[in-house]
Image (cartoon, rainbow, N blue to C red):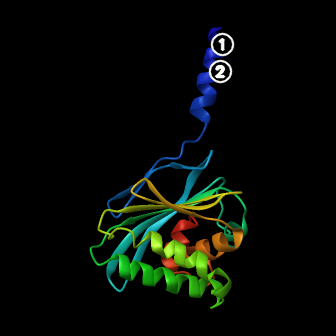
Amino acid sequence: MKLVLATIISLVMAIPTQAQVTINGVTLPATMKAGDASVSLNGGGIRKKVFFKLYTGGLYLSEKSSDAAAIVNADKAMAVKLQITSSMISSDNMSEAILEGFEASTGGKTEPLKAKIAAFVNTFKKDEIVEGNVFDIVYVPGKGVESYKNGKLQGTIEGMDFKKALFGIWLGSKPADDDLKTAMLGK
């Protein structure tokens, strides 16, 4: 019995643990829930514009990856956590930035996703965005993208086409922020 217990303790201690990470004063947890799945922090960084640090973002995946295209195209549980770190962000300018992100992510081909994009952008307009707000954008295979603000579900948008365009905002060939993309990919 002692040998079994010692073996179990040794195995548990040998398993690498992934710790939470603190970036720009924001602590990104090591894991999140994506539906019934648990996803782990792949990487995180800061979204900057000029010299303003707008938000801290983290990418969560079911398995580590630095392949942006594979992540965008994967039909696997994943999430992006954004914590607003600047009073410069409002609901209006966040909505505008999201629309610009979809334009860049889709190469300007947003028309087929117009209604889904409008519904997603509307989740950011329900209540004014203030510094400290946390947004969880969670993709659940077979269900769609769930948007949470401060832990409260704001809406769900179905479709892999939408998921690909949305995650392309951060991980596409023309990301919102190149440094943030690199950091989310754990590089």
Q: Are marks 2 and 1 in contact (CB under 8 Å)?
A: yes
Residue 131 pos. (x, y %):
29, 67
Residue on which the image places disc 1: 3
Residue on which the image places disc 2: 7
From the viewer's side, name the closer residue of 127 and 21: 127
> Which quarter of the figure is the N terminus placed in?
top right
> Which quarter of the figure is the C terminus placed in?
bottom right
The structure residue drawn at horizontal position 68% and vertical position 69%, both measured from the top left corner, is 67
141 in relation to 13, above or below: below
Residue 157 pos. (x, y %):
60, 66
The structure residue drawn at horizontal position 64% and vertical position 89%, both measured from the top left corner, is 107
Task: Give how far apart the Cα atoms at labels 2 and 1 are.
Answer: 6 Å
Q: Residue furthest top?
A: 1
149 in relation to 16, above or below: below
Per the image, label 2 sits on a secondary structure element best described as helix
In this rendering, would 177 be left or right of 173?
left
In which quarter of the view is residue 159 placed? bottom right
Residue 71 pos. (x, y %):
67, 66
In this rendering, would 40 be left or right of 92?
right
Q: Residue furthest bottom?
A: 108
Per the image, label 1 sits on a secondary structure element best described as helix
Residue 72 pos. (x, y %):
67, 70
| Callout 2 crowding tier (Cα within 10 Å): few <14, some 14–19, many ≥20 | few
